Image (cartoon, rainbow, N blue to C red):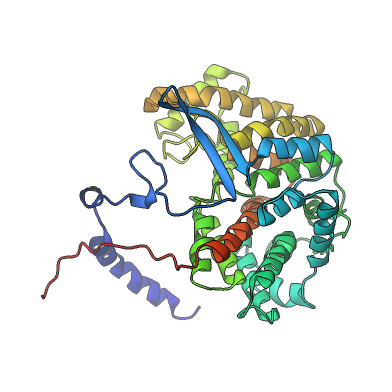
Amino acid sequence: MAGMSEVLEYATGKARLCQANDAISDELFREYGVNRGLRDANGKGVLTGLTNISTIIAFKDVNGVHEPCDGELFYRGYNVQDLVRKYVEQEASFGFEKTAYLLLFGEMPNAIEAEAFQKIMSKCRVLPRNFTRDVIMKAPSRDIMNSMMRSILTLASYDKSVLHSELPENIQQCIYLTSIFPMLAVYGYHAYNHYQNLESMYIHRPSPRKSTAENFLRMLRPDMKYTPIEAHVLDVALMMHMEHGGGNNSTFTTRVVTSSGSDTYSAIAAAMASLKGPRHGGANLKVMDMMDNIRKNISDWNDEEEIRRYLELMMDGEVFDRKGLIYGMGHAVYSLSDPRERVFKGYVQRLAEEKGMQKELSLYQNIEKIAPEVIAKKRHIYKGVSPNVDFYSGFVYSMLGIPRELYTPLFAIARVAGWSAHRIEEIIGNGKILRPAYLSVKEMEHR
């Protein structure tokens, strides 16, 4: 934009003032007993609310001792491993929609309720007339999350009840957004790919008889074709990312905005803004960048000693991004294992076999084995370091031919169900605006 270079030059000159006047030392946080980042010295989140929606277990009391254990994740009291086993393995069906019902309404759907809910979601997979042309295809961006946020906020102008909605209208809006998120993401990508990458344009409508995972692949691919294992692996990936304890940044954002009385579209757009931050939703992209680097610099993917030496260099900050991190390893909550990764790993194996990607999978498996040993040695961490769900999710998306621009939007396609559940719970159960306190540590010039 005209004149903005002058503004940037001005801002650059003033940045040092912000750095000088806005920095607050760790000593002051300790002096006043304030937990930086709402986390205590051990990394545990400060308790800011109560929820019925999901539960994370990473420690258990054994003979009066608080000890780390294999992680467990529960949606409304149901173990996610059991949900995958029931819906995907035993019933050979798709679990995302049924799990969304569970998160939203707090009960497992029976066969009739599940079918009715899936039909409702199918009815919702419709955008306003000319919306794709007039909103999504205008000003296309490589940042699909920004494109989706623009679409979400624009959709509010089509909703007559947006400013005066009661609980049923809020539920309706949440179901609608959960249903159309795949369309907003895929269409946003196609617009970017056409106008900026000069590729062919195709817009496929979702099928009313297909699941969320099936429709995502159908809309993304030129020929609309996919295999059963591809659709089921993506369905499991969505189930694993739907909700995570309520204490993550984007879910907290949802509840903060909801508590102010703001509308559903604004609350979900705010959650999207939070999720797109690289400290939150972009973890699997960092894993993929890291793996690209490893593949280029390790000659034998089965040579454990060569892999170990390179990971040690990575931990020493000498290679890759020089941050001293092995991405996809460890988690802020889980210690011994991430339950989502344990569930996901078996499906990764099946997909790798179908795609002929066993060699690449073996590299991931070797890193999964060696990295915790290297981290323990270099950082003197012996409580246990395990791979998290992001370690394999990017690999799965790459095997499915999903472009990297859609990795974080896929996270949002799953997590919007959890955000919606927390919005509804906040509307019903809190009734107070979330208003944290900040203590001023600035000395007064004049009293």
Q: Nearer the viewer, residue 395 or 193?
A: 395
Which residue occupies 50% across, 61% down?
Answer: 253
Above-or-below relation of 313 to 394: above
Q: Position of residue 224 (x, y in %)?
A: 86, 53
Q: Position of residue 12 (x, y in %)?
A: 33, 67
Q: Quadrant of residue 188?
A: bottom right
Q: Quadrant of residue 400?
A: top right
Q: Position of residue 392 (x, y in %)?
A: 63, 36
Q: Quadrant of the C terminus?
A: bottom left
Q: Nearer the viewer, residue 133 or 313?
A: 133
Is any part of residue 421 visible from this angle?
A: yes
Which residue occupies 40% across, 22% down?
Answer: 377
Above-or-below relation of 196 to 364: below
Above-or-below relation of 157 to 274: below
Q: Nearer the viewer, residue 291 or 328?
A: 328
Is any part of residue 189 visible from this angle?
A: no
Above-or-below relation of 258 to 160: above
- In the rendered structure, the answer to whether residue 383 lies left or right of residue 109 reads left
Q: Position of residue 297 (x, y in %)?
A: 55, 30
Which residue occupies 11% across, 75% down?
Answer: 446
- In the rendered structure, the answer to whether residue 307 lies left or right of residue 8 reads right
- In the rendered structure, the answer to whether residue 19 lies left or right of residue 184 reads left
Q: Count the numbered circles shown.
A: 0
